Amino acid sequence: MGYWVKRIALKDGEVVTERELREDENRFDGPPPVIGDLIEVQCRGRKFMAKVEWGSLPDRGVSNDFVVPLRVSEVGLDPSIPLRFPSGRVFAPRD
């Protein structure tokens, strides 16, 4: 069992996707964290704490051979900042 951070929303609103991350970057063995947990991730040469926004739910059984994809946001991301994706898409601020 393991988990892989595939999308990271940085403090400035930029979203880093798996296209920019190496396949072995932010990939971990062990039980996946659940939504709301804080984990340490690495992105663009720095390590920081991030909150799990999407992925595993509490009390959800996961097969041992399955890798759970996670989406996280850097601690300190202001929810009023629009998210900017590499494709140029911009998503409105979250509630």
Image (cartoon, helix red, strand yellow):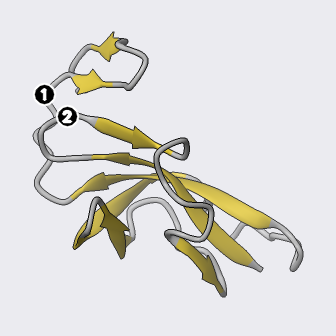
- Residue at the location (80% across, 70% down)? 61
Relative horizontal placement of residue 47, taking residue 62 as reference (left or right) = left
Image quadrant where residue 79 sits: top left
Q: Quadrant of the C terminus?
A: top left
- Residue at the location (69% across, 62% down)? 68
- Residue at the location (62% across, 62% down)? 23
Amino acid, disc 1? Ile
Q: Which mark is residue 13?
A: 2
Q: Are marks 1 and 2 in contact (CB under 8 Å)?
A: yes
Q: Quadrant of the N terminus?
A: bottom right
Q: Earlier in the sequence, mark 1 or mark 2?
A: 2
- Label 1: which residue? 81
Amino acid, disc 2? Gly
Mark 2 burial class by Cα count in 10 Å: few <14, some 14-19, many 20+:
many
Do we see residue 81 in this rendering? yes
Mark 1 burial class by Cα count in 10 Å: few <14, some 14-19, many 20+:
some
Give the tally of numbered discs: 2
State the CA–CA distance, disc 1 to disc 2. Answer: 6 Å
Q: Position of residue 13 (x, y in %)?
A: 19, 34
